[in-house]
Amino acid sequence: MPDKDTSLMARCLECDSRIYFPRRPELGQIIVCPECETSLEVVRTAPIRFDWADDGGGSGGSDRIDLDEFFNELEAGNEDGYDDYEEDER
C-alpha cells in the first residue's frame, strides 16, 4: 500500500490529529476535524495550514452573530426598564 501524500496533510490545531485530503483544499474552506470535531479554516494551501474557524478573522462569517452587539441591541429595546429577573417587592 503506498504512503499517503504528506503534501495533502495538515494537523488539527486542537487535537494534533493528521487530516489528509484527497486533493488540495480551497483557501477559506471550513474543515471539521474527524477526531475532535473542531471547525478549522484553511488559511494556506501550499503547505496546507489551518486557523480557528470562529476567530472572526476568516473570509467567512456572514452567519455569525456578534454577541456583544446582540445584547446591546436587546438592552436598547428594553426602554421601560422592566427586568425579568427583578423580584416583586411586596
Image (cartoon, rainbow, N blue to C red):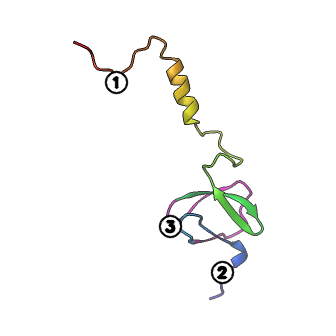
The residue mark sitting in front, 1 or 3, is 1
Residue found 67% across the figure and 61% down from its top? 50
Determine the residue located farthest toward the bottom in the rendered image: 1
Q: Amino acid at mark 1?
A: Tyr
Determine the residue located farthest toward the right in the rendered image: 46
Compare residues 21 and 18 and report the one nearer the observer. Answer: 18
Mark 1 = which residue? 85
Compare residues 5 and 10 and report the one nearer the observer. Answer: 10
Cβ atoms at labels 3 and 2 below 8 Å apart: no
The residue mark sitting in front, 3 or 2, is 3
Vertical placement of residue 5 versus 77, above or below: below
Give the quarter of the image for residue 1: bottom right
- Which comes sooner in the sequence, label 2 or label 1? 2
Determine the residue located farthest toward the left in the rendered image: 90
- Which comes sooner in the sequence, label 3 or label 2? 2
Mark 3 = which residue? 35
x and y percent of residue 12 in the render? 59, 66
Q: Amino acid at mark 3?
A: Glu
Marks 1/3: CA distance?
Answer: 41 Å
x and y percent of residue 15 in the render? 53, 67
Where the C terminus falls, by quadrant? Answer: top left
